[in-house]
Amino acid sequence: MLAVTRPLVTRLELVVETDAHEGPVYAADEHALYFTTTRRGRVSIMRLDLATRSVSVVRADANNANGMVLDREGRLVVCEQGSFTEPARISRLDRATGAVEVLLADGLSSPNDVVVAADGTIWFTDPSYAVLQGFRPRSVAGDRVWRLDPRSGEAAIVATSLDKPNGLAFSPDESVLYVGDSGAVHGPGDYDPERPRRVVAFDVAGERLVNERVFADEIPGFPDGLKVDAAGRVYVSSAGGVLVFASDGAPVGEIELPGTVNFTFGGRDGGVLYVTRDDSVWAAHLLAKGA
C-alpha cells in the first residue's frame, strides 16, 4: 500500500495514530505539529508533541477551522469556515496564551487555506464549500483568493477565476503563487472529474495576481494540500498521496500514501514532510527542505 519514489524520499514512517485532517503546521521552537480535526462533532485545533508523540487539545471549538500557518511572529493564523451561528473568519491564535484575535470577518464564505508572505501580508483561499456542504447560509457564496494586510486591516479579492480555490503556496522567492482548484468535488457524493482538478500559477505583481496559467492538470482525485520546497518543487496532494512537480510543471515523482489530506514541511533540518490522514500522521524524510 505504501511506497515512495526515490530519490525524493529516504524513509516513510507512521508518527502517530490519531484523528487528523487539515491545516498541519510545524512549530520549530516546540518541535510540535498543529492540525485541525473533528472531535465530538466540533472541529478542534490539536497539538502533537513530536518528541513524546503525545496529542493535546489547543482549542476545543475552533469554528470549523481548516488551513493554518504561522505568521512572522510565530502566531497561528487560522482559516475559520464558520457556521450558521458564527461568521467565517481569519483569526490569529497566540500559542503561548491561547488568546484568539479576529483579523477579518466580513464578506467571507469559508476560508480554506492560508500563507503569509515575507512582508507579513496574509493570502488565503475562500471557496464556497461551507454553503455547498450545508453549514453556512445560502446567501453566503464566493470562490475567491484574498490578500489581507493585518497591520492596516485592508483586505482585497485578488482572484475570482477558480471553481474551488483550495491549497496555495508561494514559490521560494514569492514571485509566483500556486493555487489548487479542487472544483471536481463540491461535497460528499458530489464528484465530477470533468470539473477542475488542477493547480494554477499566478505571477505576483505587488498586491495583485497576474498572468494566470495552468501549472498541473488532471490531478488524480483533486488537489488539496500544496507546498513548495527550497528548490522550487511543488508538492500536491492527490488520491494516491503526494505528487511532486518541478518548477516548470514537469512531474518529478510521487509519495504514495493513499488517504493523504494535507501536509507541511518541518523537522529539525526542515527535511521532513509531515502528512495528515483522517486516522494518522506520517513523516516522509526527504532529500529536500521546505522553502
Image (spheres, helix red, strand yellow):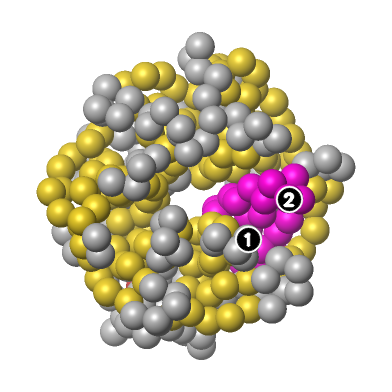
Kindly identify the residue that appears in the image at 24 percent across and 60 percent down.
206
Q: Quadrant of residue 156?
A: bottom left
Residue underneath mark 1: 74
In the visual, does 151 lie left or right of 73? left
Name the foreground residue: 83 vs 177. Answer: 177
Q: Are marks 1 and 2 in contact (CB under 8 Å)?
A: yes
The residues bearing labels 1 and 2 have C-alpha atoms spaced at a distance of: 9 Å
Task: Return the residue found at the far front.
Answer: 119
For residue 130, say whether it is visible: no
Three-letter amino acid code at the position of disc 1: Gly
- On screen, residue 197 above or below 187: above
For residue 290, say whether it is visible: yes
Residue 158: give x, y in percent of width and height. 23, 65
Residue 1: give x, y in percent of width and height. 57, 20
In the visual, does 268 lie left or right of 1? right
Residue 269: give x, y in percent of width and height. 65, 32
Kindly identify the residue that appears in the image at 40 percent across and 81 percent down.
152
Q: Which label's residue is closer to the chain start, 1 or 2?
A: 2
Give yes or no for residue 220 being in the magenta stretch: no
- On screen, residue 71 above or below 288: below
Residue underneath mark 2: 29
Name the dominant secondary structure of the magenta segment.
strand
Check disc 1: other Cα within 10 Å, few if <14, some if 14-19, many if 20+.
some
Give yes or no for residue 42 being in the magenta stretch: yes
Q: Which residues are magenta?
A: 21-47
Check disc 2: other Cα within 10 Å, few if <14, some if 14-19, many if 20+.
few
Three-letter amino acid code at the position of disc 2: Asp
